[in-house]
Image (tube, helix red, strand yellow):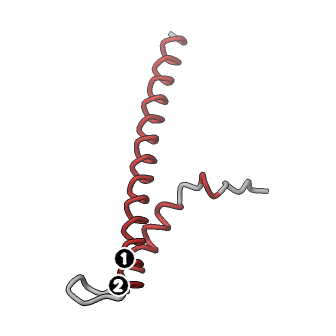
Amino acid sequence: MFHKTPAAHDPHLPLDALERGCDDSAQLCSLGEPMTEAQLQLRAELIAKILETRTKLRMIRDKAEELQLALERFTATRGTRRA
């Protein structure tokens, strides 16, 4: 049986949120049109979610780079031990 990744650690969540953000932003009024308080609130929430998603994606990218460097160091160390 497959182990379900907890939601807080699911790497697809930022991407899913970004895709949902694109769908939501298509429904927003343009900035030149007058907006209700609810529409302004929706726009503010969407912007906050997009900024949060970008931050999470940056963290995932940085972690992937760190892991790649660690793997390269491990591989290099392992190679020198065998020699």
The x, y position of residue 70, in whole percent, is 47, 28
Q: Taking 45 as reference, is 57 above or below it?
A: above
The x, y position of residue 2, in whole percent, is 74, 56
- CA gap between label 1 and label 2 equals 7 Å
Q: Taking 67 as reference, is 18 above or below it?
A: below
The picture quadrant where one finds residue 30 is bottom left
The x, y position of residue 73, in whole percent, is 45, 23
For the point 48% across and 60% down, which residue is it? 14
Residue toward you, 48 or 14: 48
Within 10 Å of disc 2 (Cα), the crowding (few <14, some 14-19, many 20+) is some
- Kind of residue at badge 2: Leu
Within 10 Å of disc 1 (Cα), the crowding (few <14, some 14-19, many 20+) is some
Q: Secondary structure at mark 2?
A: loop
Q: Which residue is the extreme one toward the front? A: 37
The x, y position of residue 61, in whole percent, is 41, 46
- Kind of residue at badge 1: Arg
For the point 49% across and 17% down, which residue is it? 77
Q: In the visual, does 5 lie left or right of 53?
A: right
Q: In the visual, does 82 lie left or right of 42?
A: right
Q: Quadrant of the N terminus?
A: bottom right
Q: Secondary structure at mark 1?
A: helix
Kindly identify which residue carries mark 2: 28
Q: Taking 66 as reference, is 42 above or below it?
A: below
Kindly identify which residue carries mark 1: 43
Tell whether label 2 touches label 1 (CB within 8 Å).
Answer: yes
Q: Earlier in the sequence, mark 1 or mark 2?
A: 2
Q: In the visual, does 8 lie left or right of 75?
A: right
Q: Which residue is the extreme one toward the right? A: 1
For the point 41% across and 38% down, which residue is it? 65
Q: Nearer the viewer, mark 1 or mark 2?
A: 1
For the point 40% across and 65% down, which residue is it? 48
